[in-house]
Image (cartoon, grey):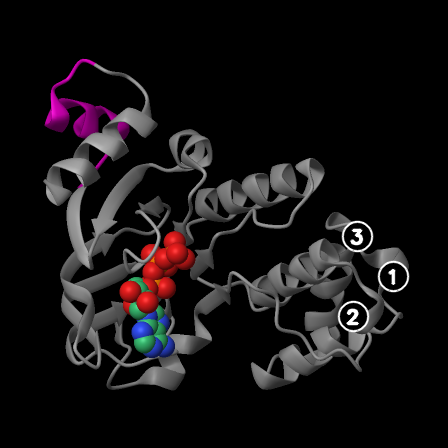
Amino acid sequence: MIVLEEVTKNYGALRAVDGISLRVEAGEIFGLLGPNGAGKTTTLRLMGGIILPDSGRITIGGISLLQDPVAAKKIIGFIPDRPYVYEKLTGREFLQFIADVYRLERSRAMKRADSLLEMFGLDGRQNDLVESYSHGMKQRLVIISALLHDPQVIIVDEPMVGLDPAGVKLVRETLQEQAKRGSTVFLSTHTLSLAEEICDRIGIIHRGRLLATGTMEELRHLVQTGVQDLESIFLKITMEDIN
Ligand code: ATP
């Protein structure tokens, strides 16, 4: 479960996130949509404990991220939009390193790593240096590393960028499977069809403010245009805010 209460983040004079309150339940997939610069990545980084808010409260699985950041981060799997990995380690060494960071029992963690490596089609390359991986392979490795500790809360920034169609399908199915098993999945995306397909609820953010949240049905009702697709709803909500 993720709870945000009146969360605000400023970068100098710019208010990147403006008083966002939101609750996402266990087993739910929530998608955050918004134009470029709307505040999506900032919101995700706040939820992952990577940056601190100027005000407001964030609770992850009942644990205050601000008061007990280590305990909260233990149950978070964070997948950034760009795969930052140690190039001079092999894929398997990188996963061992991550298992150690999370203080997981090594043999159990590496057993899980093996099955994830196989699932993500990296088992044949696990002993090669990460620097020899393609962008999509690095992205797959980062996703595996974020799932290694079986997180209760998965935060994903633009999950599909740089992945081939098979990778997209795999990530989509993995996120759905994790949610089915009770994890909370929070993702940001520009891929409206993905949001429409896998998200239980969608939030639309613009200029740091959460303009609307709801199921597709609720968002349709909100704009009351009779249009059916998420793209039209998204444009209507964000354009109305501009005008
Ligand atoms: P995109 O879809 O383009 O990735 P986004 O919705 O993820 O955008 P953010 O990256 O959260 O948007 O940025 C929100 C605002 O905060 C933007 O105006 C951006 O320029 C600004 N911003 C983000 N990070 C920083 C930073 N480290 N320092 C200063 N300003 C920042």
Q: In which quarter of the image is residue 174?
A: top right
Q: What element carries label 3?
A: helix
Find the magenta span and give its range: 213-226
Q: Is mark 1 on a helix, strand or loop?
A: helix
Which of disc 2 and disc 3 is earlier in sequence? 2
Q: Which mark is residue 125?
A: 1
Residue 217 included in the magenta stretch of the image: yes
Label 3, label 1: how many angstroms apart (C-alpha)?
A: 10 Å
The location of residue 166, given as percent across then percent down, is 70, 37
Q: Residue 118 carries which label?
A: 3
- Judged from the image, the secondary structure of the residue bearing numbered disc 2 is helix
Give the quadrant of the C terminus. top left
Asked whether residue 3 is drawn in magenta, I would say no
Q: In which quarter of the image is ligand 1?
A: bottom left
Residue at the location (38% across, 38% down)? 199
Describe residue 195's horizontal placement relative to residue 93 as left or right.
left
Instruction: Name the residue at 52% across, 51% down.
Output: 159
Task: Name the quadrant containing residue 46.
Answer: bottom left
Seen in the picture, residue 144 relative to 173 is either above or below; the reply is below
Kindly identify which residue carries mark 2: 91
Q: In this view, does 100 lie to the left or right of 94?
A: left
102 w.r.t. 19: above or below? below
Q: x, y (%) of residue 203?
A: 25, 45
User: Few, some or many C-alpha atoms within 10 Å of disc 2 (few <14, some 14-19, many ≥20)?
Assistant: many
**How many C-alpha atoms fall within 10 Å of the one at disc 3: few (<14), some, or many (≥20)?**
few
> Which is more foreground, mark 3 or mark 2?
2
Marks 1 and 2 in Cβ contact (< 8 Å): yes
Name the residue at 45% across, 76% down.
74
